[in-house]
Amino acid sequence: MNLYGSCSRSQRGHFLSILMPCLSLVPFLVLPPLRYRGLTLVLTFVFYASFHLSRKPISIVKSELHTNCSSLEKIPPNDTNSTTWCDWAPFDQANYNELFGALDNAFLVAYAIGMFISGIFGERLPLRYYLSGGMVLSGLFTSLFGLAYFWEIHVLWYYIIIQICNGLVQTTGWPSVVTCVGNWFGKGKRGLIMGIWNSHTSVGNILGSLIAGVWVSSAWGLSFIVPGIIIAIMGIVCFLFLVECECELGLDASSQPPAGRREKDPEVTLSADDGSCSRENTIDSSEYPKEPAEQPGAISFLGALRIPGVVEFSLCLLFAKLVSYTFLYWLPLYIVNVAHFSAKEAGDLSTLFDVGGILGGILAGLISDYTDGRATTCCVMLIVAAPMLFLYNHVGQNGIGSSIAMLIVCGALVNGPYALITTAVSADLGTHECLKGNAKALSTVTAIIDGTGSVGAALGPLLAGLISPTGWNNVFYMLITADILACLFLSRVVYKEIKGWCGCYTRKRGYVLLKSQVCRVFL
């Protein structure tokens, strides 16, 4: 008996077959592979944190690419405009906000388009190769953006093209990590587990802000190069150590011992209830011959859209992510312009929004597990977020204390629903009972939900760049409107959840269906 077939290179063809199984071979022959479950949770946490770590520097560097040069103590060169001599061309123009918006939009539009395609590829390619390749390429394009500082590149199209390429390759991340976690964890505590796990987004943003802030005023190119190197290294770690599913711990025909020695060997089977992998002891296959189980095919794009709840949560995420990504890309610049902090101080202060996001994601997951109401949890947090955004804009900059408190509260209320929908809700819908155990739908469902949300993520920074010249108040009015629209798209599902709590309907993990209508579209 063995794990991965053997501890040799023949089973997996990479270092994982040598290092990991041999360290703990004996316990896993008897006990469930909890250590691999924990390892997968930690690795995917670190991997996606590195994705956000590489996205954050652009928001920190914006205030350095265009700053008020007249306020600096340095003396400008002769015959130089005193207000723009220290800016980095082409962002030294009066329409710099629109140019920054174009940079953000190039990344986010490419990300949104690529996300719809990414889930389809993710279901048909080995996730370990797919994810690790995307991480290495993300590191390359992030570093190329920073190298423009040392190569003294001042052409706008260079930055636009780099952003587009980076947006496309970063779509490999989210469907892959959610699928891996969904394969290893059941539905029991999924909201809490994924709420804690989803803090990787905020952790990555915090680390990205701190790392970028170290070099933003001295050599801003390093603010991109260092995160690029980090995510590329994490891509190599992913290739060596990621275990996609418990199914990978099984045997194949090439590595099985002779028939007389197969008795009591563990065999990996696919549960028909939830599509998750499980292990069970089998007896000699020569005595009880079996027909090979037919593997379910990957679900189509339209088939995924027909899963109850996918459309509602996708449209809600569009506006929730619009708010979240506007803060991600524009909060440091807002703090510089309104509170008049330095670029490094604004970057450090903006991390408090992500601290609140960690707390909000955990709280949303815990509440939704307890109430069995994903949609209601999201809707309540979005409703409370609207007045909090208004208060932050009007009183949040009155003092450092109020600014810290309001940033944490707003971060929790804005990122809580966003985190819940992109993790627990996506995993729930991707393993819906209508799929009849087809686990291959998880990647496509995740990509559809997050891809739709990414459309909002592209619109938010773009609208902020267009609206901010008219005043920051108008930007916040736009964010409040988006919060309200997100609630409206969930209203039907929330209504059914409330009816379900009264005993009129049947609840199923955050969306509610009439008993007579469950899976009707699939029958």
Image: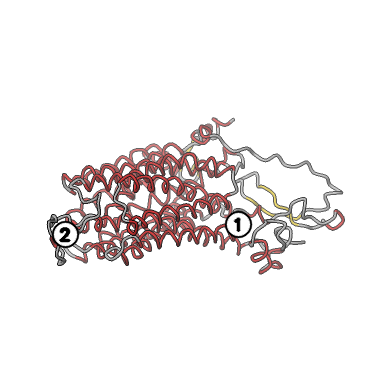
Q: Residue at x 18, y 60 (%)?
A: 339
Amino acid carrying mark 1 in the image: Val
Q: Residue at x 36, y 39 (%)?
A: 491
Q: Earlier in the sequence, mark 2 or mark 1?
A: 2
Q: How is the image coloured?
A: secondary structure
Q: Residue furthest bottom?
A: 23
Q: Is residue 299 left or right of residue 337?
A: right
Amino acid carrying mark 2 in the image: Cys
Residue closest to the eye, 143 or 427: 143
Question: How far across and down, in percent of the image, does residue 304 sit?
Answer: 52, 36
Question: How far across and down, in percent of the image, does residue 444 sit?
Answer: 52, 41
Question: How far across and down, in percent of the image, does residue 102 sit?
Answer: 30, 44
According to the picture, the residue beneath numbered tag 1 turns out to be 243
Q: Is residue 396 left or right of residue 314?
A: left
Q: Residue at x 38, y 54 (%)?
A: 55
Residue closest to the eye, 78 or 194: 78
Residue closest to the eye, 409 or 73: 73
Closer mark to the observer between disc 2 and disc 1:
2
Question: How far across and down, in percent of the image, does residue 324 sit?
Answer: 33, 50
| Element on which disc 2 rests | helix
For label 1, count other residues whose C-alpha is less than 10 Å away and answer few (under 14), some (14-19) or many (20+): many
According to the picture, the residue beneath numbered tag 2 turns out to be 69
Q: Is residue 125 left or right of residue 392?
A: right
Q: Residue furthest front?
A: 78
For label 2, count other residues whose C-alpha is less than 10 Å away and answer few (under 14), some (14-19) or many (20+): some
Against 19, residue 331 (above or below) is above
| Element on which disc 1 rests | loop
